[in-house]
Every structure is written in structure tokens, then in C-alpha cells.
Image: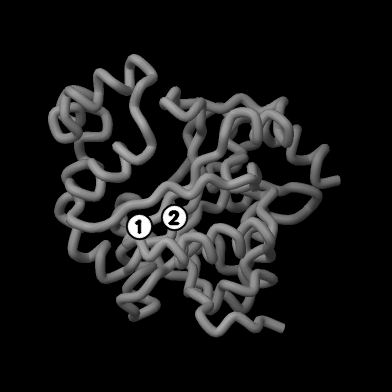
């Protein structure tokens, strides 16, 4: 039984279509429906949330095809892009407080990982919290999965597939997020927003986590915190055929 009086609502972001190698190999463009041991991948994420003490009501945003895979879980119609899906999820929960946003492709997720991230995020008091996983932590748990790492002053890190954001803050920073999302494939435009000084320090591996938090917080008009987590399953996403094979083996 859930006992956390400050349990937060959650949104599973399951929209979009996969057109990469994974979809070609499986014939399934909806990643949430990829079967792992006869269960759609989204079942593993929804199950972890259902058992987590820190999570209250859960809604999913995605295509109608997910309806049969999510009995008892509200399914919100997907929009044209990720930003509109986040907006739909936040609006469904009708709160200005913290909301957990996560993707559907992290089938290794556990209730303990969710609770640790949410509790530490709430304790930080930040408007937006994002998980970072050290390369050593990820390699010890999922050494066979290829991940992209960023070299910072404190070490090499990969990101997680969830964030804890105060809904009221997200609505406030929405125009900035929309602009950044539109520029996501234009590195020089993004670099101008972040600042060349930070970009140079990042390229040299001298950028500190606190500097990233400060700069992003200034840009967004709120407080941002990186949560260094020991739960590598938060970032172990299945987006390649070999990832799916590994998931089949590890979740057997």
C-alpha cells in the first residue's frame, strides 16, 4: 500500500512513431508495444510506477493502439510532437506541483529507482530535476548496452529518461522550451543560447555540473538540479535491435 503522503502524479510519454532500425527489425513502429516476453514494453514501466510509493495517479499519452495494452490507465491522445504530449499530460493532472515525466522505453525500471529519484528531487526543492548516471554505474549494470556519455569535470555521465518538473514552472517556461526544441538540430543556434564560454568548457571537459544547473536555470527562469543516481535502469532505454535482445535476456 502506498504510504507517501506527497506522492506525485506521473505521465508516460508514449507518442510518436519509430522509423529506425528497431522498427524495421520488429515491424512495430509503436515502441511502447514492442513485446518483451509476451508483454508490451509499456507494461514494465506502468508496473514500476504502480508499485512505487512516491507516485500517485498515472496517465499515458500516445496513439489509440495503446488502449488495449493499458487497461485501467487513462490514455490521452497524442499531439504532433513531444512538447504537445507533455502539455497534454500536465493538463490532465490539473496541478501546479511536481509531476514525473518519463518515456515508455525503459523496461528495466523498478519502483525503488522511481522512489529514489522522486524523493531526492522533491528534497532538492528545484523546479526541474533531471537524472545523471555515471559511466561506471551504467557499465556495472548494463555494460553491454551502448550509451552516449558527456564528459564533465566530475566525470563521464549519461542522462536518464525521466524528469521531475513543477507543472506551473513548465507552463511558465513553455515558450523557451518550444524555441529550444525547434532548434534541437541546429547546434550553433543552441550554442548561442547556452553561451560560448560554457560550450568551450564542455568541449574541454572542464564544465562542472553546478555550472550547467546555474546556466540552464537562468535561461529557464527557475531552479534546475541534476540528480546523480545509482539506478542505471532509469537510463537504459531500448532503442536498437541489440537492446531488445538484451532486454529479453535480462528480464527473462
Give residue 57's position: percent from left, percent from top.
52, 78
SS label for mark 1: strand
Residue at screen point 50% across, 26% down: 155
Residue at screen point 71% across, 48% down: 35
Of the numbered discs 1 and 2, the one sitting upstream in the chain is 1
Q: Nearer the viewer, residue 43 or 201?
A: 201
86 over 207 or under it: above or below: below
Where residue 164 sits, quadrant-wise, is: bottom left
For residue 178, the mark is none
Cα–Cα gap, marks 1 and 2: 7 Å
The answer to whether residue 124 is visible is: yes
Whether the residues at callouts 1 and 2 have beta carbons within 8 Å, the answer is yes
Around disc 2, counting alpha carbons within 10 Å, would you say few (fewer than 14), some (14 to 19), or many (20 or more)?
Answer: many
Q: Nearer the viewer, residue 189 or 72?
A: 189
- Left or right: 156, with 144 as reference point: left
- Left or right: 19, with 24 as reference point: left
For residue 128, the mark is 1
The answer to whether residue 62 is visible is: no
Give residue 175's position: percent from left, percent from top.
15, 54
Residue at screen point 46% across, 61% down: 121
204 over 67 or under it: above or below: above
**Which residue corresponds to mark 2?**
163
- Left or right: 72, with 167 as reference point: right
SS label for mark 2: strand
Amino acid at each position: 500500500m502506498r504510504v507517501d503522503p506527497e506522492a506525485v502524479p506521473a505521465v508516460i510519454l508514449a507518442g510518436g512513431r519509430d522509423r529506425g532500425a528497431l522498427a524495421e527489425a520488429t515491424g512495430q513502429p509503436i515502441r511502447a508495444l514492442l513485446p518483451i516476453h509476451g508483454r508490451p514494453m509499456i507494461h514494465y514501466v506502468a508496473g514500476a510506477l504502480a508499485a512505487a510509493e512516491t507516485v500517485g495517479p498515472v496517465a499515458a499519452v500516445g496513439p489509440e493502439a495503446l488502449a488495449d495494452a493499458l487497461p485501467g490507465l487513462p490514455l490521452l491522445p497524442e499531439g504532433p510532437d513531444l512538447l504537445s504530449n507533455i502539455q497534454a499530460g500536465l493538463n490532465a493532472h490539473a496541478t501546479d506541483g511536481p509531476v514525473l515525466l518519463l518515456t515508455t522505453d525503459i523496461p528495466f525500471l523498478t519502483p525503488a529507482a522511481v522512489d529514489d529519484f522522486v524523493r531526492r528531487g522533491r528534497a532538492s526543492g528545484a523546479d526541474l530535476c533531471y537524472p545523471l548516471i555515471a559511466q561506471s554505474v551504467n557499465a556495472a549494470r548494463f555494460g553491454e548496452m551502448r550509451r552516449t556519455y558527456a564528459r564533465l569535470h566530475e566525470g563521464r555521465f549519461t542522462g536518464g529518461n525521466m524528469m521531475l518538473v513543477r507543472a506551473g514552472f513548465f507552463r511558465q517556461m513553455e515558450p523557451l522550451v518550444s524555441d529550444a526544441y525547434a532548434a534541437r538540430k541546429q547546434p550553433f543556434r543552441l550554442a548561442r543560447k547556452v553561451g560560448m564560454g560554457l560550450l568551450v568548457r564542455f568541449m574541454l571537459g572542464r564544465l562542472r555540473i553546478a555550472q550547467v544547473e546555474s546556466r540552464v536555470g537562468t535561461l529557464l527562469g527557475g531552479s534546475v538540479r541534476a540528480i546523480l543516481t545509482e539506478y542505471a535502469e532509469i537510463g537504459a532505454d531500448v532503442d536498437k535491435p541489440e537492446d531488445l535482445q538484451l532486454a529479453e535476456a535480462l528480464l527473462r
